[in-house]
Amino acid sequence: MNHPGRSPEVKAVAVATVDEMRERIRRKSKLKGRQADDQSLDEVRALLGARPQAGHRRDLLIEHLHTLNDAYRCLHDRHLVALAKEMNIPMAEVYEVATFYHHFEVVRGDGQAPGLTVRVCDGLACELAGAQDLLARLPALLGNQDVRVIAAPCIGRCEQAPAVAVHQQAVPFATLEVVVAAVGQAPASASVAQATVPFAAADFAEHSVTGTGAVDAMPGYTGYALYRANGGYALAAAVVNGEEDAERIIKAMEDSGLRGLGGAGFPAGRKWRIVREQPAPRLMAVNIDEGEPGTFKDRTYLERDPHRFLEGLLIAAQVVGVEACYIYLRDEYHDCRAILQAELDKLRADPPCELPLIELRRGAGAYICGEESAMIESIEGKRGEPRMRPPYIAQVGLFGRPTLEHNFETLYWVRDIVEKGPQWFSGFGRNGRKGLRSFSVSGRVKHPGVKLAPAGITVRELIDEYCGGMAEGHDFYAYLPGGASGGILPASLGDIPLDFDTLQPYGCFIGSAAVMVLGHQDRARDAALNMMKFFEHESCGQCTPCRVGTAKAAKLMQAERWDGDTLEDLNLVMTDASICGLGQAAPNPVRSIQKYFPHEIGATA
């Protein structure tokens, strides 16, 4: 019985015998989930090399995935398990990153990837040049070989349309015969051009940089020794050694009017001041992802004159107080990567001045990584998903540090602007605009290519003065002034000055200055559908308005008569609720068709 003031007696109940408890402990001590096998671990370690004393860096996950993908032409799931163990990170993180990027293919079990992949670009310029015919006929021609033929979004060779990539080899002006021959050679890696040709883009001001004759897939370029012999890196060394005043450099950038040339157009000098005022350590991230359809200017300059860009990077790093620079280069530019890596090695071997840490990072086939915060996520070894803002990356960017983010071409012009004076750059221009613009021109023109023309030039002037006019058999019908995102305008509006802020009243923008020209035999609605399918394919999937909206819009746009009200509902949701510029700009081509080409979609003006 219970007595007052005493606790009730508790009778002990055995929950398990001693042997049962031992069995439970034994089961719990056994690791859950799939474990790495010794063979896979050995194969991964052989490729990655010895583990650093502090362990493998988490931010190098994508680089390690590339190493495996290059060796096996796929990612075997057993290697992903081994990589997770070797890097001491969860398997779920490795898998979610590996499955995010288009150029990684995860193969389960004993499955095997094709021996060779042929990627046929189906971007607008290549589609106009016959890409769909290549896609239809190549599988049969290559059917007896271990080859896979797939469509690929714009690979940045629009002036060489149709363009194909055979593994890592670019095939410009592709024909069935040329592609079959390239497959027969089965190159294992990218080729490297000869570093023998002096090149300075400033010499081409108000002229065509490319598109005036035969196009070489890999032209010669200005190597380190030749660049130094022509005064290269003298300015960078003077800045680093304190012989040039940093404030004077920033003032020159501001007075030149140079704006970000990746698409956003933020004033470069102002950006330097903002980041310079942030607490150290500060970092730099350089965007050479150049995935906007129709854009190939960065590749054009990089494969001809890599050190002018690198000198601009060194000047910016010193002026802003940057400790480490990360260059993010799109994976499709295999040839450029080989050049840039080789020239970086030469720069490090014989530096003209003290260098910051410079790392070259490799994209993996994701257009979204052209968005600055998505690129930073990718550099950190994660899925390339845009961040919510604020905070802005100038304050909290790469690895949580203030980050100066620039497009390749913005840095490319730094040396010329400082040496020649800001008035040299701002002295060009038409129609009240100032500066130079590198227009990537493709489509139905006689001579597509990069045209270094004055800001404010009209598309009609660009076609006539720089492109030799329209291609034979084509009359000017329409144009895309700013790549996939910049909208579509009719030829009747071909006299609008092309520059930042001049196209917004027409529902368009210049972006990266990728001008795609349509002829009278083309339909603007087909171009808009091509763009929407691209956005659907490249949406990162993080936010519903973009992920679902682009897919729904692409389906609706295939109808002969468009459902304008439903499309506009989608346009509003994507514009107002998408996290980043991809979803926000995706409606631009749709609205352009509804406004300027109603006759093509069964509507009235």
Image (cartoon, rainbow, N blue to C red):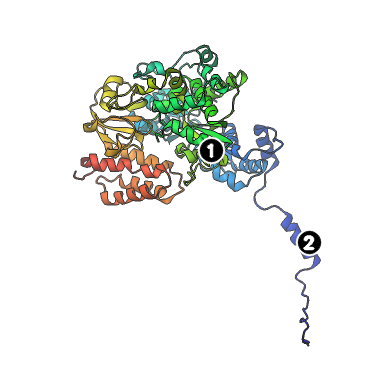
Label 2: how many Cα within 10 Å (few below 14, some 14–19, many 20+): few
Q: Which residue bears the numbered disc 1?
A: 278
Total tally of numbered discs in the picture: 2
* Rendered residue at 31%/20% (across/down): 466
Which part of the image, by quadrant, shows the N terminus?
bottom right
Q: Position of residue 499 (x, y in %)?
A: 32, 30
Q: Which mark is residue 22?
A: 2
Say which quadrant the C terminus sits in.
top left
Left or right? Give the position of 119 relative to 465: right
For this orientation, the residue located farthest to the left is 604
Query: Between tags 2 and 1, which lies in front?
Result: 1
In the rendered view, tell whether residue 410 sits above or below residue 89.
Answer: above
The answer to which of marks 2 and 1 sits earlier in the sequence is 2
464 left or right of 299 in image: left
The kind of residue tagged 1 is Gln
> What amino acid does circle 2 point to?
Arg
Would residue 143 be seen by someone viewing this image from the given angle?
Answer: no
Q: Characterize the local packing of mark 1: few (<14), some (14-19) or many (20 or more) Cα atoms within 10 angstroms.
A: some
SS at badge 1: loop
Residue 536 percent coordinates (x, y): 40, 43
Horizontally, residue 7 falls left or right of residue 496, namely right
Q: Is residue 254 at all visible to an observer of this figure? A: yes
Residue 34 x/y as whole percent: 65, 49
| Residue 594 vertical placement versus 193 (above, below) | below
For the point 35% across and 51% down, which residue is it? 573
Query: Who is closer to the viewer here, 565 or 510?
Result: 510
Decide which of 182, 250 is in the foreground and name it. Answer: 250
